[in-house]
Image (spheres, rainbow, N blue to C red):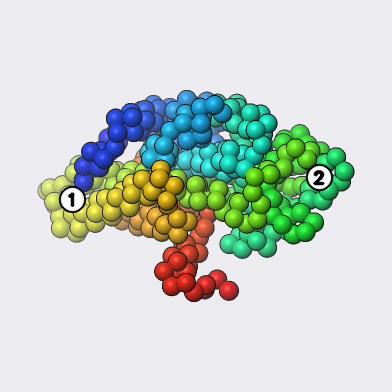
């Protein structure tokens, strides 16, 4: 069982820009991860299953909807606090952060923003406490980067809606109690609708064979004439902008989380380079290894500054979708490059589960694709700076 020796790296004294509350929240999440998750994460990854007993602990550190108001069971924290929790969770494993950020940004967020008071009271306190787990249904077998082409639909059937269709690549689906599903009505308008486990015709098959995010459960959502009560429709917003606003929140969390993965790979490589000796001295003393390590901490520091500023803008309600896309794309790519370089520093040991690097690398190959691919986010920036739409 690997001992988690991580202590954190702050090359530009970023802690000076955080409040005492921010640091307490981060350190509390870090301590919980080191005690409860790090000792079991490699085994969970090998088994290919999320350790569901961790759900209560994630809730206790504020990992489910930390920015949700206290009146609905949340902690009422700011966006930087949310980001720091995501950073500490993904420092351990991307799948762990996925479980948390899906619940927070893709399930609780739309209910909070677009739901009725009754929906908020019914679902949010239980989701915040980890008594219920949710998932988010947008991606379909034939519609990923083009979610507007979805075919999942619902029809008015009097006192209820009839929902039909399927969603794919859904985190938390196999054990979720509720699903926030995006589907088209009879006029072709996209709406969010809350589907609850146990509704006849609703099934959630588990997906197998993943070489990435193995410590996160992924599945399908299948709807076959599912009768959904009309009071389960989210009335606050419709159109494609509604689910995309949820993805903004999730992508923001990913931008922080990817820093955590990068930090863990850097921390592992730095410690190994100081201890591993070749030709009579630590490999940290060789120029090429110093080049790798110096570039790693440089890129991490740049990402930290970018993301902290984004968090400030989120707190002020001024962050744009394009700014969030830039941070998600930059930071995940940064973490992937660091994982690859760190693996080289460790040589053959880098591919073993004695160290976390190969697991991070495999996980990040999913993170660079989901919630907006690396290329799509590039085009979002391109559209924002030129005004020309390259998507069509």
In the picture, measured across the screen, residue 133 lies left or right of residue 76, that is right
Of residues 132 and 334, the one drawn nearer to the viewer in this rendering: 132
Residue at the (47%, 35%) spot, across then down = 67
Which is in the foreground here, disc 1 or disc 2? 2
Point out residue 354 in the picture as x, y percentages from the top left corner.
Answer: 37, 40
> Is 275 above or below relative to 62?
below
In the picture, measured across the screen, residue 265 lies left or right of residue 100, that is left
Residue at the (65%, 56%) spot, across then down = 239
Of residues 49 and 124, the one drawn nearer to the viewer in this rendering: 124
In the picture, measured across the screen, residue 268 lies left or right of residue 86, that is left
> Is 173 above or below relative to 34?
below
Residue pointed to by mark 2: 161
Mark sitting earlier along the chain (1/2): 2
Image quadrant in which you'd find residue 217? top right
Q: Is residue 272 visible?
A: no
Determine the secondary structure under disc 2.
strand
Residue pointed to by mark 1: 283
Q: State the quadrant of the C terminus.
A: bottom right
Residue at the (69%, 54%) spot, across then down = 190
């Amino acid at each position: 069982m690997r001992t988690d020796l991580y202590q954190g790296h702050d090359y530009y004294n970023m802690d000076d820009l955080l409040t005492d509350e921010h640091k307490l929240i981060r350190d509390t999440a870090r301590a919980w991860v080191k005690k409860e998750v790090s000792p079991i994460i490699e085994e969970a990854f090998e088994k290919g299953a999320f350790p569901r007993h961790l759900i209560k602990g994630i809730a206790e550190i504020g990992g489910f909807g930390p920015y949700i108001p206290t009146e609905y069971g949340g902690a009422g924290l700011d966006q930087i606090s949310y980001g720091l929790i995501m950073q500490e969770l993904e420092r351990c494993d991307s799948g762990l952060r996925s479980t948390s950020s899906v619940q927070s940004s893709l399930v609780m967020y739309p209910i909070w923003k677009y739901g009725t008071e009754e929906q908020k009271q019914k679902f949010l306190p239980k989701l915040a406490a980890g008594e219920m787990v949710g998932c988010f249904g947008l991606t379909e077998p034939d519609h990923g980067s083009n979610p507007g082409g979805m075919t999942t639909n619902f029809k008015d059937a009097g006192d209820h809606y009839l929902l039909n269709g399927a969603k794919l690549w859904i985190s938390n689906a196999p054990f979720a109690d509720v699903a926030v599903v995006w589907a088209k009505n009879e006029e072709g308008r996209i709406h969010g609708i809350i589907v609850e486990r146990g509704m006849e015709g609703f099934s959630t098959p588990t997906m197998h064979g993943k070489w990435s995010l193995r410590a996160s459960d992924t599945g399908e959502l299948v709807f076959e004439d599912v009768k959904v009560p009309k009071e389960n429709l989210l009335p606050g917003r419709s159109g494609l902008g509604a689910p995309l606003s949820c993805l903004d929140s999730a992508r923001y969390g990913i931008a922080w989380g990817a820093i955590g993965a990068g930090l863990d790979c850097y921390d592992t490589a730095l410690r190994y380079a100081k201890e591993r000796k070749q030709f009579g001295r630590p490999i940290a003393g060789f120029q090429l290894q110093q080049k790798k390590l110096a570039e790693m901490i440089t890129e991490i520091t740049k990402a930290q500054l970018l993301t902290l500023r984004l968090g400030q803008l989120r707190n002020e309600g001024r962050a744009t979708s394009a700014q969030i896309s830039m941070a998600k794309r930059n930071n995940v790519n940064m973490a992937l490059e660091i994982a690859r370089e760190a693996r080289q520093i460790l040589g053959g040991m880098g591919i073993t589960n004695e160290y976390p690097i190969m697991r991070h690398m495999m996980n990040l190959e999913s993170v660079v694709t989901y919630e907006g691919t690396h290329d799509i986010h590039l085009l979002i920036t391109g559209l924002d700076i030129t005004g020309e739409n390259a998507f069509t």
